Amino acid sequence: MPAANPTTSLANQRAKIASKLRDLRRERQWTQARLATELGLSQNRLSEIERGAGSLSAEQLIRVLTLFNVPLSSFVDAKPDPERQLQNALARLGATDLHESTEVLLSELLTDASRAIREALITGAPRLVTAIAPVLVRHARTLNLRGLQAELQVLGFPHRLPWVVDNTLRAVELLGDRLPHSLRASVATIRLFRDQLSHNATPSAPPDILDPSIRSTKTAETTARRGSDTSRSWGIVSALTPEDFVVPLRSALEAD
């Protein structure tokens, strides 16, 4: 399939914004002259924009969102893609091994590290889970890890955060001296949180199948049997090992 023409894509997006802007103005029964005044434009310039022959500046678009009390997503036809939104959030928060899609708007719910980590752990997708490692290391000193643990416990995932913390700390150990001194205080914060937790899963608790691709009992049993010591310790069923968390950590460090 041929790649999309960026010029055509931009023109299409401009046309969608023009149509939405015109609809919002008419629904409010505003004249072009009134909206132009609100946006600091001439009426002729606004007319061009509503025909798709021009673009709003970022400041003008923000003003439109405020004037009509609509979210930015109202100007985009595409349906929300939660997993790609989460991928974008993790990428912006420091997981540089993830590709940030320019076609997906970043969800307002995923603009902080705690929410992104929580959603990645709930999703369970391996590439998103391993991306938590650099986000943890970069933001540990501002994260409320206890609060995050309490949220996940209420949701029925009491061992996922301790498990990912343990994997992150083991990945840091595998990196050795490659970790910058500026991040060592963050690692100390993560280690303190881990040390304050119970170190083992509740013996009577059922195993927590992390990877959503594991759909059969046989696959779950095989994965659990082959799992790392960290996974067995926390009762997590996952093929991920501490070595898998090294890659995103190293990628983030090399990007600095």
Image: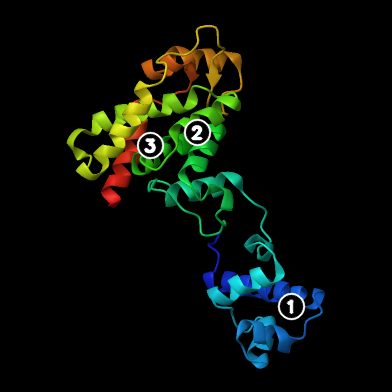
Residue at figure coordinates x 38%, y 19% from the top left: 230
Give the label, 2 or 1, closer to the camera: 2
Residue 31's label in the rendered image is: none
Q: What residue did someone put label 2 on?
A: 148
Question: Image check: 176 left or right of 52?
Answer: left
Residue 22's label in the rendered image is: 1
What amino acid is at disc 3?
Ala
Quadrant of the rendering where the N terminus is positioned = bottom right
Q: Secondary structure at mark 1?
A: helix
What amino acid is at disc 1?
Arg
Residue 59, given in percent of the width and then of the height, sits at 54, 75
Please report whichever mark, 1 or 3, sits nearer to the chain's N-terminal start: 1
Is there CB contact under 8 Å for labels 1 and 3? no
Quadrant in which residue 12 is drawn: bottom right
Residue at figure coordinates x 52%, y 36% from the top left: 118
| 77, above or below 13, in the image | above
Give the label, 3 or 2, closer to the camera: 2
Please report whichever mark, 2 or 1, sits nearer to the chain's N-terminal start: 1
Q: Badge 2: how crowded within 10 Å, few (<14), some, or many (20+)? A: some
Seen from the viewer's position, the closer of residues 167 and 113 is 113
Q: What's the CA distance linking mark 3 and mark 2?
A: 15 Å
Q: Secondary structure at mark 2?
A: helix
Residue at figure coordinates x 68%, y 76% from the top left: 18
Residue 181, given in percent of the width and then of the height, sits at 20, 42
Seen from the viewer's position, the closer of residues 21 and 31 is 31
Residue 133's label in the rendered image is: 3
